[in-house]
């Protein structure tokens, strides 16, 4: 079965007409076709030197600062690039003109000393640790944004008009809700206005940029310019992002026609035939965009929970009930808190609910018989075929494809356990998906089998589990898989700089001692057979 067929909705699909809901909700979500920028600008996304530093080039032209604690330590060692942040993420915008004692940054570089714009940007982003940035790339980006990005044109026009009128202080208000604006690239003159005082037509989510303020202001995630301001390289025309006024195009009588944040980004992250998307070609910047989009989705869910506490019975559950369960008996320990229901993924009640479900299974079926770890492999034919078809050089640049293929593989793996019965009749199973430090997912699975198929002796373990290399002559395919994907190290004195080394010892206790047969210890922990002189392989010249 192909990867595309695995994502179809079975109850709605036919053999020659598959139906999908993950991308557009059966056609209810329809966004404009992405605009194609100029050929020189598109050519940058084919340059390896540009893609390696695309986040630096984007920061150079970004109109807002990215407020987050970025963890670069995960990229010190070798391996695929991973964008990782911790804590809250926010976008901040400053004034149009820098203070007299400071150099221009972000938005200010668009209107400050425009004759030397390229040299000003390169001087500000001169960082010897990230390598030299190409002046040619900066010139192409600058000329493209100055000509096509309506937000850039708006700020430049505001500065020119204010200068012509002799205004020393002024503000530019970008409206959050414009009645005649459509999805996609904004029309000239519809984004905002120059104001000198209070504007009665403004809302609390409007962006107000002052000419001389000195203080950065946080942009609301509900404003359609939230993403275009931060990612001008992905949205060179200043296309609108998500906003609460977006509506679906469904013909049903459903009263709720709102396009949620999750629906919007799900549509954006899906590639479509005969439709070019600059967003999906962003490489490392695309990783940052996905993280930013996920945080917007999560923040939207938290805002919903916070604004609907009355329907969630928070006064009872989060107040008195939680206090009594902790053993508090005095009223001063009971306070108003934000209650996260069990339906909120990742919350404490969500985790506790699934923990209780697992204990209920153990109460019925006893201890699980098998613990299986199913790992992701970027060399799977489905991933490789997609990357080759769409011209993606590195699979790390499309984490969305890796996650989608892995989810389909997990579902096929569970189906294999139940239908093919490699361990016998399956009574129950549980699994959880985790992500490694470098981004690849893996699945931990607990399997309960029927009493007649359970392992009772140590000799029966060898039928299902082996800690020895397969015979390269009798099982060449299995030998190749094990030696390429399932070996640890080398570590120890052969490689003291291995990530698993702590205090000159392997934290995984590798290598394990050899023994001629599989045995159980007094705690019923299994020790697998590892015979001396078995098959071997070379890895990292060891």
Image (cartoon, rainbow, N blue to C red):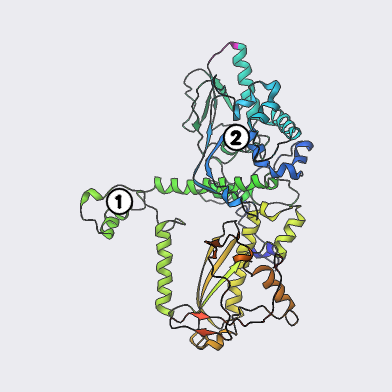
Taken as a whole, is the magenta stretch helix, strand or loop? loop
Using the rendered image of the protein, determine whether residue 9 is visible from the camera's viewpoint.
no
Please name which of the two marks, 1 or 2, marks the residue nearer to the observer: 2
Residue 508 vertical placement versus 227 (above, below): below
Residue 82 vertical placement versus 473 (above, below): above
Query: On the picture, is 421 further left or further right than 390?
Result: left
Between 338 and 114, which is closer to the camera in this rendering? 114
Q: Position of residue 133 (x, y in %)?
A: 71, 36
For image coordinates 28% across by 48% down, the residue present is 335
Q: Secondary structure at mark 1?
A: helix
Q: Position of residue 261 (x, y in %)?
A: 54, 46
Between 330 and 203, which is closer to the camera in this rendering? 330
Q: Which residue is mark 2?
A: 229
Task: Kindly give the residue lying farthest to the left in the view shown.
Answer: 330
Q: Which residue is mark 1?
A: 315
Q: Which residues are magenta?
A: 165-169
Among the two numbered marks 1 and 2 on one chain, the one whose residue lies closer to the N terminus: 2
Residue 294 vertical placement versus 175 (above, below): below
> Does the magenta run of residues contain 166?
yes
For image coordinates 70% across by 21% down, the residue present is 115
Q: Position of residue 298 (x, y in %)?
A: 49, 49
- Mark 2 residue crowding within 10 angstroms, few (<14) / some (14–19) / many (20+): many
Q: Position of residue 410 (x, y in %)?
A: 60, 67
On-image quarter of the C terminus: bottom right
On-image quarter of the N terminus: bottom right
């Amino acid at each position: 079965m192909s990867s595309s067929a695995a994502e179809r909705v079975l109850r709605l699909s036919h053999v020659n007409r598959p139906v999908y809901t993950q991308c557009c909700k059966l056609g209810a979500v329809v966004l404009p076709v992405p605009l194609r920028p100029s050929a020189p600008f598109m050519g940058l996304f084919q340059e390896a030197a540009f893609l390696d530093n695309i986040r630096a080039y984007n920061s150079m032209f970004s109109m807002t600062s990215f407020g987050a604690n970025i963890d670069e330590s995960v990229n010190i060692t070798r391996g695929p690039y991973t964008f990782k942040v911790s804590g809250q993420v926010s976008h901040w915008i400053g004034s149009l003109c820098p203070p007299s004692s400071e150099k221009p940054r972000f938005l200010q570089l668009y209107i400050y000393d425009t004759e030397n714009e390229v040299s000003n940007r390169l001087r500000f982003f001169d960082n010897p640790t990230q390598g030299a940035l190409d002046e040619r790339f900066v010139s192409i980006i600058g000329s493209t944004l100055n000509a096509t990005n309506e937000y850039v044109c708006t700020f430049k026009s505001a500065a020119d008009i204010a200068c012509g009128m002799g205004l020393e202080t002024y503000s530019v208000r970008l409206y959050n809700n414009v009645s005649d604006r459509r999805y996609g690239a904004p029309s000239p003159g519809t984004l905002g206005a120059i104001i000198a005082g209070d504007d009665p037509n403004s809302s609390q989510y409007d962006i107000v940029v002052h000419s001389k303020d000195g203080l950065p202001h946080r942009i609301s995630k509900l404003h359609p310019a939230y993403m275009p301001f931060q990612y001008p390289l992905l949205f060179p025309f200043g296309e609108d992002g998500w906003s609460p006024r977006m509506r679906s195009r469904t013909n049903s009588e459903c009263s709720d026609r709102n396009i949620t944040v999750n629906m919007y980004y799900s549509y954006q992250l899906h590639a479509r035939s005969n439709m070019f998307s600059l967003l999906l070609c962003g490489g490392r910047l695309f990783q940052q965009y996905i993280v930013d989009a996920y945080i917007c989705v999560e923040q939207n869910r938290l805002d919903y929970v916070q604004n609907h506490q009355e329907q969630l019975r928070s006064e009872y559950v989060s107040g008195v009930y939680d206090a009594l369960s902790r053993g508090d008996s005095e009223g001063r320990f009971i306070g108003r808190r934000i209650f996260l229901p069990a339906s909120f993924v990742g919350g404490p009640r969500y985790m506790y609910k699934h923990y209780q479900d697992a204990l209920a299974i153990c109460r019925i079926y006893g201890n699980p018989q098998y613990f299986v770890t199913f790992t992701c492999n970027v060399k799977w034919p489905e991933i490789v075929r997609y990357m080759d078809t769409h011209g993606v050089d590195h699979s790390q640049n499309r984490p969305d494809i890796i996650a989608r293929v892995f989810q389909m593989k997990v579902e096929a793996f569970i189906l294999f356990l139940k239908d093919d019965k490699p361990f016998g009749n399956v009574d129950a199973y549980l699994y959880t998906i985790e992500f490694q430090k470098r981004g690849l997912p893996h699945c931990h699975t607990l399997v309960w089998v029927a009493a007649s198929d359970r392992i009772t002796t140590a000799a029966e373990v060898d039928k299902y589990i082996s800690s020895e290399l397969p015979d390269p002559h009798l099982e060449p395919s299995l030998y190749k898989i094990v030696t390429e994907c399932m070996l640890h190290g080398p570590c120890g004195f052969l490689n003291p700089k291995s990530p698993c080394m702590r205090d000159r010892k392997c934290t995984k206790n590798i290598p394990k001692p050899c023994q001629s047969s599989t045995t159980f210890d007094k705690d019923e922990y299994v020790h697998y057979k590892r015979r001396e002189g078995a098959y071997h392989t070379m890895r990292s010249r060891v």
